[in-house]
Image (cartoon, rainbow, N blue to C red):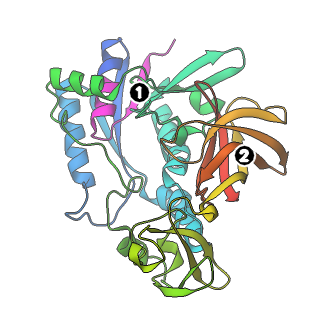
Amino acid sequence: MVKRVVVGMSGGVDSSIAAYLLKQQGYDVQCIFMKNWEDEDDEFYCSSEEDYNDAVQVCDLLDLLLHSVNFSKEYRENVFKYFLAEYKSGRTPNPDVLCNKEIKFKFFMEYALKLGADAIATGHHARINKSTDGVQLLKGIDRNKDQSYFLYLLGQKELSKTIFPIGDMTKSEVRKLAVKMDLPNSGKKDSTGICFIGERDFKSFLQQYLPAKPGKIITTEGKIVGQHDGLMYYTLGQRKGIGIGGGYGLTEEPWYVVKKDLDNNHLVIGQGHDHPGLYSKNIKARQLHWITSAPSIPFECTAKIRYRQKDQVCTITSIENRIATIKFTENQFAPTPGQSVVFYGDEQCLGGGIIETV
């Protein structure tokens, strides 16, 4: 019987309502605010100090004990170093996925258990189902806010001690309840940007840690059309910020990043959203992780290659050395090395991997 639940309190409306609901259900609820980034805050993104103040106000209103813990060192070692290494290697990482695994469901969970927690809870829009196959991770009811994509690296150990109190609610229902409760953060916008770092000018932020190496922008036909600021600032399928206007080519269609040629330091672009270089039906994925058990191959399921994408029908045709070959029924727009491909069986998130090649 779960009695004490420790909630990861971010200062946002989702975690606040999660804590409120658990208290209403009779649990012994305590909260933890995590600070995971030490650099000075500035006016361009929501500071950790503001978030902490919101968390304090909510916990005071709900009469809940709030602990504060600093995981900045753990974040830099286990998430941020990987983040920089991936960009340096020409890939586009998804830090939110690793942040969940390494910080929220590892260091935070360990800290909560030391406080006597029987389980932890977060404000993620996801659900958990206990079955004969183990603990399953399910999509959140609100499909526009479902966050199971970012949680695919969790395993049985983590999920067996986790509660997602708002997984059965839509975002509008969460906000309405927050307004009804007169929570001070009821109108606070959802956080975006880099996990725990916030909303910043991405290029200037990355420049602080990685040296830029400008190079040529070339078309898929090999024509030099400009200069890029450094391949790490671009991602496959990117349209804005390339610096090549739509009227430059044979048509008025915009240009897209088709490839990053690391050997020659060339940014390869193609014109038009339908450019064939932007699409692929086949991808490979490394570092596979399955939430319950690995499927028999070949395996038909659906998958997402980016957050909020509609489920795409695919077949995992082979797995060798934890590298999967995946064939989609329809062409996929700009599969991006470093991003996650996450597998689903209807409502259930099965696991996923990191896109390696296309």
Residue 117 in the image: state x and y as whole percent. 46, 26
Q: Which mark is residue 142?
A: 1
Pick whichever of labels 1 and 2 is earlier in the sequence.
Answer: 1
Q: Residue at x 62, y 50 (%)?
A: 332
Q: 136 and 163: which one is in front?
A: 136
Q: 212 and 260: which one is in front?
A: 260
The range drawn in magenta is: 1-19
Residue 230 in the image: state x and y as whole percent. 49, 80
Residue 355 seen: yes
Splitting the image into 4 quarters, where does residue 88 fall?
bottom right
Q: Which mark is residue 35?
A: none
Q: Secondary structure at mark 2?
A: strand
Q: Residue at x 72, y 19 (%)?
A: 133
Horizontal side of residue 262 vs 30, given as left or right: right
Query: Which residue is the site of mark 2?
Result: 288
Horizontal side of residue 336 vs 247, given as left or right: right
Q: Say if 2 sits above or below 163 in the image.
A: above
Assess whether mark 2 and mark 1 are in contact (beta carbons under 8 angstroms).
no
